[in-house]
Amino acid sequence: MSKLGVGVVGVGEMGKRHAENLRRLVPPAKLVAVADADAARAKQVAAELEIEHSYSSLDAMLERKDIRCIVIATPDKFHADAVRAAAAAGKDILCEKPLALNSEDARSALKTVEKAGVRLQVGFMRRYDPAYAAAKKRIEAGEIGERVIFKSIGRDKDAPPIAYYKSRLNGMLFFASSIHDFDLARWLMQDEVSEVHAYMTVAIRPELEQCGDIVAGVVNLKFQKGAIGNVESYAQCIYGYDVRTEIIGSKGSILVGGLRQTSATFLRADVGSYDVADHFLTRFADAYLAEVRDFVDNMLNDRDPRVTGTDGLRAVEIAVAAQTSCLNSVACAVDKSV
């Protein structure tokens, strides 16, 4: 079987990791080229990975006939356009989350993918994390009974610089971070979210309000079958990268992540009573590798991706509803209209 030719567009922190994995740790794939709006960065990454081709635009890279698949890791703002361009060029796609920053663009991207007859996977890598995968199997085996409550925490370590927010290249917190938890909610509860009620704060960084973003948010969820949930997201907890999820059922509970069983746990940047991962690429290193290996294997064997474009769309719809709820201080139904 010939190797799968892959190109990566956007080789910042996330895209570079995908490119490294493809080049060094996924033998059935051939990293043919990388592209980035910063041509010098693309050239540097290509040199580091010892590949010949780098480009300053996706369009230029899409002209290559030896590339069958595109990995999209640009800033969030450009995801939907990149999906449409890659699909129109007949390439299969692995797109980092979020699929888009609004429901209309997400649906448009999916229509282009369907029309082109290509395959799209959205990068919800937590589904590939060994702990989350094990939890999923135990839930499906009925070990916790009927699912009643979903709870998830996502806290990033370092405060992004104000320039990150002012650029408006990425989605606000619900799209940039919480969207992982929204996907987990659907996946682990095996149900759709029908309604959300979101709360937010900019108390420690009031300047973010002018940028259309928030420091922290809490989103209450209502599921179609009657279960409830809660997602907490915090952009700058300082003490570490902290991700935890719990699903409570009629027979028990299952917790992914967590801290040692002590009466009180103290967490601070300089000292703490528990070691916490320092970065998402550290915590989910295995998941990112498993994700791209699975994508390559499915594409080579003409199988549909495990995480679909529809999964990406549903998570975007929840994020849109959460953003609307915050702006209007009301509960908001999740719009799944086509």
Image: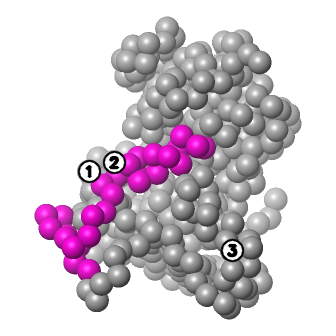
Relative to 220, residue 9 above or below: above
Q: Are marks 1 and 3 in contact (CB under 8 Å)?
A: no
Q: Is residue 85 above or below residue 266?
A: above
225 relative to 35, above or below: below
What residue type is disc 1 on? Pro
Q: Quadrant of residue 132?
A: bottom right
Q: Secondary structure at mark 3?
A: helix
User: Which tag, 3 or 2, sits closer to the chain's start?
Assistant: 3
Question: Would you say 243 lies left or right of 198 here?
Answer: left
Estimate the spatial distance between the alpha carbons at disc 3 and disc 2, rounded to whole Å. 38 Å
Q: Residues within 10 Å of mark 3 (few under 14, many from 20)?
A: many
Amino acid at pointer 3: Ile
- Res 269 seen here: yes
Looking at the image, what colour scheme do you see?
A: one colour
Per the model, the C-alpha gap separating discs 1 and 3 is 40 Å
- Residue identified by numbered label 2: 164
The range drawn in magenta is 265-291
At 21% across and 73% down in the image, what residue appears?
273
Identify residue for label 1. Answer: 161
Identify which residue is drawn at 60% across, 24% down.
27
Question: Which structural element holds mark 2?
Answer: helix
Residue in the image at 50% along x and 70% along y: 256
Whole-percent x and y of residue 189?
Answer: 69, 74
Residue placed most toward the observer, 275 or 309: 275
Residue at horizontal 65 percent and vertical 86 percent from the top = 249
